[in-house]
Amino acid sequence: MEHSAPVDDMTRRTIRTDNLPKIPIEGCAAVPVVANSDDRGCLFEIFREEWAGAFKTVQWNACSSLAGVMRGVHVHVDYDEFYTLPFGRVFLALRDIRRASPTFGKSVGFEWNAADGFAVPVPAGVAHAVFFLDNSVLAFGLSGYWKAELDVIGCRWNDLDPSLRWPVESALLSNRDTESGAFDDMVIKYEALSSSLAGRPASGI
């Protein structure tokens, strides 16, 4: 596959930072990405470990969803995520439930279009939900391998923060998300699981 000429980091930031949303959560600052567009479509440069806000990833997933789908609210205890949006339009909601974080309790929700040209890091302990406004593809890197037994914590999407202004009153949910409980219960489960993992020996020891 042919690639467009690389864009140096300074140029990339100069042409993209004006469109970045202000995300008031520690570790979630939006990261400019490169979109090399022409009449055929677009080749996105969606990740470089050298970018500010990026981190080493060991697994990448692509999530294709139809308009009207809600994924979340979920929160992870064992890895950070790096969200990119190569195609489509979504509404992303975040809330910091890390008690040690300087932005504990802060939340934000915003519309995000693939043409906006940025990625969003989502650290462990930041609860998140994605509503797909259009048919979209969300691609995301993980700092640790996904484990089904640890991906069990979440809450109802409309209980994440009553102050959030969702662009929808109902959504298509998975069975897991349909059965999710209250926000306060999610925080209790997150802290309990985080505490139990902190007491485990590191892998291979």
Image (cartoon, grey):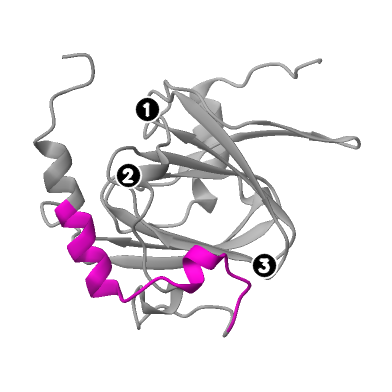
Q: Of the residues shown, which amino acid type is indicated by label 1?
A: Phe
Q: Quadrant of residue 57?
A: top left
Question: Residue shown at 59%/81% (left/top)?
Answer: 168
Q: Is residue 186 visible?
A: yes
Residue placed under numbered mark 2 in the picture: 123
- Residue type for callout 2: Pro
Give the mark, 3 or 2, whose residue is nearer the N terminus. 2
| Mark closest to the chain's N terminus, 1 or 2 | 1
Q: Which residues are magenta?
A: 170-192
Report which residue position mark 1 lands on.
55
Q: Position of residue 121 (x, y in %)?
A: 41, 43
Q: Are marks 3 and 2 in contact (CB under 8 Å)?
A: no
In three-dimensional space, the C-alpha distance between marks 3 and 2, rounded to whole angstroms, equals 24 Å
Residue at 49% x, 27% y is 59
Would residue 197 appear left or right of 111 to someone viewing this image? Answer: left
Q: Which mark is residue 171?
A: none
The image position of residue 130, as x and y in percent, is 53, 61
For the residues labelled 1 and 2, the Cα–Cα distance comes to 10 Å
Question: Where is residue 169 shown, x and y percent of the image?
Answer: 57, 85
- In the displayed structure, does residue 98 sit left or right of residue 174? left
Q: Answer with mark 3 or mark 1, whichever residue precedes in sequence.
A: 1
**Label 1: which secondary element:** loop
Cα distance between the residues tagged 3 and 1: 28 Å
Is 60 left, or right, of 86 in this rendering? left
Q: Residues within 10 Å of mark 1 (few under 14, many from 20)?
A: some
**Amino acid at dot 3:** Leu
Residue, disc 3:
133
Main SS category, magenta section: helix
* Residue at left offset 35%, top offset 82%: 163
